[in-house]
Image (tube, helix red, strand yellow):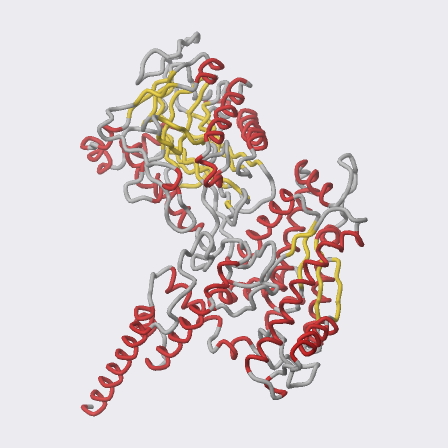
Amino acid sequence: ISCLLFVNVECSRTFDVTLKRMRLITVSTCQLNQWALDFDGNLERVAESCRLAREKGATYRLGPELELCGYGCEDHYYELDTIQHCWESLVTLLKQGHSQDLLCDFGMPVLHLGTRYNCRVLCYNGKILLIRPKSSLADDGNYRESRWFTAYNSQNKGNHETFPLPSFVAEALCQYKCPFGLGYIQSMDSIRIGCETCEELWTPQASHIGLALAGAHIVGNGSGSHHELRKLEKRISLITSATSKCGGVYLYANQCGCDGGRLYYDGCSMIVVNGQVVCQAPQFEVTDVTVLTATVDIDVVESYRASIPSLGVQLQNATVTTNLSQVSCREANLAVAPMSRKVTPPLSAVRYHSPEEECCLGPACWLWDYLRRSGASGFLLPLSGGADSSSVAAIVGVMTSLVYDAMTIQKDSQVTKDVLRICGKQPDDKWVPSSPQELAHSILHTVFMGTVNSSVATKSRAARLSENIGSYHISLAMDNVVTAMIALFTTVTGRTPAFTTQGGTMTQDLALQNIQARLRMVTAYFFAQLLPWITSGGRGFLLVLGSANVDEALRGYMTKYDCSSADLNPIGAISKTDLKRMLHFLGTEKYPVLAEIAAAPPTAELRPNSGDENEEHSQLDEEEMGMTYEELSWFGRLRKLSKCGPVTMYLNLCQQWSLSKREIAKKVQRFFHYYCINRHKLCTLTPSYHAEGYSPDDNRFDLRPFLYNFRWTRQFAKMNELVEQAEEEEKNYEQVT
């Protein structure tokens, strides 16, 4: 490398100056199921993506954000070991020839002059051409990037800085420095390739705009973007608009899977040319490595840009390009012979999943990653026959279907290896499940824990759903355990609590409900430890699945340390409304009993049933809460997404709801009262799949106190004042008219 700004590698080839009709390049993007701090596994998956890209004839390969260490390392980024191991992986990739005749864009953290950056490292033929740091960091919602990284600011730094490579890297690569900063690569055949990273696409002054004005033909975005319901359309809109305005080829690479936390990175990597999607990867899958390739015509990009007069004017007047430097790689001849390839045509339609499909597919893939990487041998689910626990069971059923298809149809070797381990087979065993139900029977264990308060209807639904899915099912009565606890209290105190319908107080009533719920949690963990002794000779352990939805958590309508407390909760950030839609969808497509479950009124079945035991239970959730699940969704979205306090929420709902203002105020005050007194429950919330933007997850996403003044004196007084003022105005208006 001869100088700071230009990487000049002497080329032994003769450049063909003959005018060609088309300037084609085959480009490649990928999605990888990386795992935080799994450096060896991450390295294998990155190397496999490079191999597949080269096998498909690509000369440019893009990978996800921070792919060498995994995006979710969090405070492990503080450790120098994390950065050191990433350099080791990079050296291995380059020494093994994975960048031979392939321009590779890798993601990894880099420490430069005492500052930690989230970087793209562009390499070709075993050399590092450019380290490009991220200039805009993600700090909203689940993201905390500025906790670990610094946003790069190129002002007052000229063009590129010089980055001295670590000594062991320099010795291994026979290269001692490389450019560091914002810029792009220009190949020998005058193809310009730049990059931006995840959040930079979402900013008002996105990096791809400056790159387009600097003449970059191709922009690669290595991303770590997680799934949220209904988010994909916005993401694809941003990606397609990036090149519909400025022209160009845009490659998007995302992680796909659970890399160790609550988030599921939902893939959907793609290649876009002049605003049209030409390749799209699956959004949800259990495969570890997926590579997309497309052959694109660079001349079509230049023609598209030349047809936009306003773009030409801005290009002439652009000042942003002064902060972007060109790094020339004279060895890189990225174009392919025109006759050897055909240009990849646009897709006829971009694939979007319905929210109902997202609700089951995302958590299913998340559960599969957690199961196979935790070393567990299956799940145990307390299955009540209600909508929430049935939703969790159905999601596991969808998981077994995805895994079965990957094992039998796609012949995925890694999935097969994981299935054999989980099911207790030998690595060389030729066993293949005959159906998803047979696989589910080995993985999912469901337990109906009935009491005298349980209805015949829910017991029947639980059994029939288990049969539909194929789970190993137990139906037990736990009245003797509840009776023993009550007897213990009576022995110690001489008093016997009773339900309100039997003459007891509300405190006694709640205590009797809560002890049933908490004993179910204890029973679930007891069976999770011992059932493998019965079903598989003591092999492995079971993960306990919880089943509380986001709306119940938001209001605190659940018993602390009941069956909402578990190892994992795949529906903890999904609303009751979306869950019911999912049940209707799966009831039509897959498991018939789910339609019946979705139609049944939600009930806890913890009090004595005032009706016939063969009828639906008389204890109804929405009556006890004093609000509907749909209203809870309104409260949740306004509180979190619209940043509303009590007064602003009341004013917003006065515009949205047709109820009287006094009734609206009463509902808002009731919600905030219960939200406050139950907020402490969210400090121990089971780790849940993140799916909804108004999730109240106290641990990472929704950072708020858990000891409130539940009287909300100033807020409620102001709200009541507004109600009285509105009623007075209405009264005066009626008198006038």
Residue 165, above or below 459: above
| Residue 274 seen in the figure | yes
Where residue 322 appears, x then y in whole percent? 23, 28
Where residue 33 appears, x then y in whole percent? 55, 39
Tell whether 335 sits left or right of 522: left
Residue 71, above or below 672: above
Q: Nearer the viewer, residue 5 or 172?
A: 172
Residue at x 47% of width, y 54% of height: 699
Tell whether 83 sits left or right of 409: left
Where residue 294 appears, x then y in whole percent? 48, 32
Tell whether 529 sits left or right of 153: right
Q: Nearer the viewer, residue 348 or 155?
A: 155
| The C terminus, quarter of image | bottom left
Residue 547, above or below 47: below
Q: Quadrant of residue 159?
A: top left
Q: Nearer the viewer, residue 16 or 499?
A: 499
| The N terminus, quarter of image | top left
